[in-house]
Amino acid sequence: MAIPDEVVLRWKAATRALGIRLTDEDIERIGASGIGDRITMLDEIAHYTGSRDVVPDYLADTRKMGSDDEY
Amino acid sequence: MMSTSDLLKKPLHEVSRAIASRDVSPVDLTQATLDAIERDNPTLNAFRVVLAERAFDAARRAASEIAGGNYRGPLHGVPVAVKDLMAMRGTQTRAGSIVLGDEEDTEDSEAVRRLQDAGAIIVGKTHMPEFAYSPASNNQHYGPVKNPWNLEHDTGGSSSGSGAAVAAGLVFGATGSDTGGSIRMPAGLCGLVGLKPTFGLVSARGAVSLSWSLDHIGPMTRSVQDAALMLDVLAGYDPGDSRTRQVPTGDYAESVEGGVSGLRIAVLTDDGTGGLGTDAVLAGMQAGVEALEAAGATSAEIALPQISDLLLVNLAILGVEAVAYYERFLRDRPDELGEWTRDRMLGTYAFSPTTFVQMQQARAVLREQMLHALSDYDVLALPGLPYEAPPLGVNTSNTRYTGAFNALGWPAIVVPVGLGEGGLPVSLQLVARPWQERLLFRAARVVERDGPWQGGKFPPFPDVSLD
């Protein structure tokens, strides 16, 4: 899947801040691993799970899932 | 009298008993181990460094202590290996790179400390892909690790050397780390038992991080009992690692033969992407579930499309946390990173700045969905990987069934359930709710004992050279 232009622009800007200039060859090579697909799918997940009421789970929250005996 | 090579093929718990009864000397066992490593490591590329002198010192100390009646427990005098991302005083920890580990460690990682305190003999540190950032054993600096089941095939990553070393009988157990499946993938592809414990059960202090909120440390062994024995040593609260929790630990090995009577098994039919795996994977999975049913468990099929979403969540969080830690090398020493690693890290910069937080939200939502879907079950059964070990190279589908459970932090164990069409192992993965490792060991033991693996098989190498 082709990587949207706005994503390429964002990508180039972010890496330029590291002092790295991504070439078209770089974009093609790294993009071949499925970056475009992945970003699309991440957007889809964010769309259906994102809500102002959902508190981000920064560390795997394992506290309340064990049985009382085990925890 | 048992030959040395036969001894090296014994599971950890059997050798442990022989050491405790003084039928086997830790010094002789360490010598045999080091001889085997010297013979086979040039072929397998499992060890980055072998610590022969230290191992002999530890073995002599163990022999003396045991002879004096000071037996420390089941790992006392047993040769093991640690992944080369765990700090060990007086050694370099490279984590598969050439930018880390120029200086010798001045402290032990918590896992190493616990193993040494238990009297284990650490004979060396094992190879891994750079920073553990690959589902395969590929490493531009040190070369790939060969799978003892077929030397032209991969071990999987990232605990690659640990997998090859244990499978080939070079050590009786090893530590791995697992951020998206890096214990379970090489264990599954090398015919081993590999446990990713609950997030926070085993300290990761002193282990080079790939992703702080997804890294797990755990055992890789040739039997379920062995994994439980290692977890008995590794598990426990560590005030030096804020991720660890004060939960009751121990008695894992004692729980292994507890059986599965009444256990409710959910058997995965769909992870949201379609077919589950090769015919051999499906047959192994079915045979494993049948073994559980025959032992008194019940099962029902379940579709969990959340698994593929959780895998993406895992990949995104992992990517951002990895570059947060390693960006300094991208910025200052990019030419010293392998191309695979550098490209993976650079790819993360294509994400939106909000992706990381949105994925943490997704993690919370998907966790609730998974808990709800599995509320009537004790254990989820699914493949460890969708296939047997692929040829050397990188197959990114390796993490298909593993990454979700790093995002959740739930415990997961792989156990071998047969050989695939190419003669390499296939595995069943069992997953439970947090802190239910004892339950997982009980179920995995039934599969190991009554399933197609029948308590153990050995790869053709080193007895038969595959060249």
Image: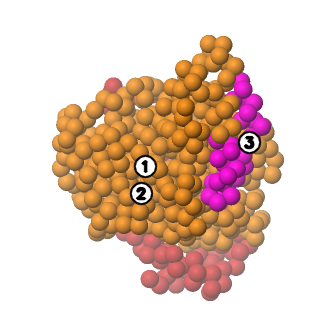
Chain colours: A red, B orange
CA separation in Å, label 2 and label 1: 9 Å
The secondary structure type at the circle numbered 3 is loop
Query: How many marks are shown on the rendered structure?
Result: 3
Tell me which residue sits at (51%, 26%) in the image: B17
Q: Which amino acid does label 1 sit on?
A: Lys
Tag 3: residue type?
Leu
The residue identified by callout 1 is: B457
Residues tagged 2 and 1 counted as in contact (Cβ below 8 A): yes
Majority secondary structure of magenta residues? helix
State which quarter of the image contains the N terminus of chain A: bottom left
Q: Is residue B280 left or right of residue B239?
A: left
Subunit bearing disc 1: B
In this figure, which residue is indicated by the disc labeled 2? B425
* B68 sits to left or right of B17: right
Query: Which marked residue is nearer to the observer: mark 2 or mark 1?
Result: 1
Q: Mark 3 points at which residue?
A: B51
The magenta segment: B33-61
Q: How crowded is mark 2: few (under 14 residues within 10 Å), some or many (20 or more)?
A: many
